[in-house]
Image (tube, helix red, strand yellow):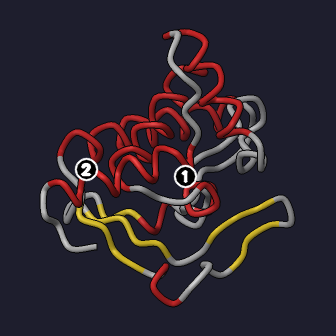
Amino acid sequence: MENVANYTSILTSAYTGLRRGELQGLKRSDIDFSEKLLTVSHTRDRYGDRMPKTKRSYRTIRNDDVLISQLESYRKWCIQKKLWIGKQHEVKDNVFISYQDGTPIADNTLNYRFGRINKQVDLKKITPHGLRHTHATILISQRVSL
């Protein structure tokens, strides 16, 4: 069921423009499903959880029904996955987990997921950081303040 994890992480990246570390550091408690808000308050890298890169990195992002619905479906999948491997899913848990053991995704996982998708759909290489730039370009073209 790797596809739900791939799809959700890439969709979240595309819809929010989050940095790779921000996506990896996203906690369940950072998502307000009823208000459709996602708050960036920490990041994650190979050394563990960290503070965001800059003061402006702390932010709240309003999302639409498509992303919120997918994040909710993915959350339910994570709960089932963690129970299957004998772990409890908690609000403080990372949103994006390894589908093998339920731990937070590794530092290179997003690059791996993007690479698999690139091969499957025969696209030019798209990276998490490249998608961040694409997101910003779309916002600028719609005259949204960054």
Q: Residue 95 carries which label?
A: 1
View extreme (left): residue: 142
Between the C-alphas of marks 2 and 1, the distance is 25 Å
Relative image position of residue 143 (x, y in whole percent): 13, 64
**Image quarter in which the C terminus is found:** bottom left
Say which quarter of the image contains residue 53. Answer: bottom right
Q: How many marks?
A: 2
View extreme (bottom): residue: 55
**Which residue is located at x 63 percent, y 29 percent?**
113
Could you tell whether 112 is left or right of 53 in the image?
A: right
Where 37 sits versus 51, above or below? above
Q: Depth check: 84 or 63 in front? A: 63
**Which residue is located at x 76 percent, y 29 percent?**
100
Mark 1 burial class by Cα count in 10 Å: few <14, some 14-19, many 20+: many
Relative image position of residue 128 (x, y in whole percent): 56, 45
**Which residue is located at x 54 percent, y 63 percent?**
27
Which badge, 2 or 1, is on the more N-terminal residue? 1
Give amino acid for label 1: Val
Q: Depth check: 10 or 146 in front? A: 146
Disc 1 on helix, strand or loop? Answer: loop
Q: Mark 2 points at which residue?
A: 138
Could you tell whether 113 is left or right of 79 in the image?
A: right
Q: Depth check: 142 or 73 in front? A: 142
Q: Disc 2 vs disc 1: which is toward the camera? A: 2
Disc 2 on helix, strand or loop? Answer: helix
Say which quarter of the image contains residue 72. Answer: top left
**Which residue is located at x 86 percent, y 66 percent?**
47
Q: Depth check: 102 or 3 in front? A: 3
Relative image position of residue 17 (x, y in whole percent): 41, 56
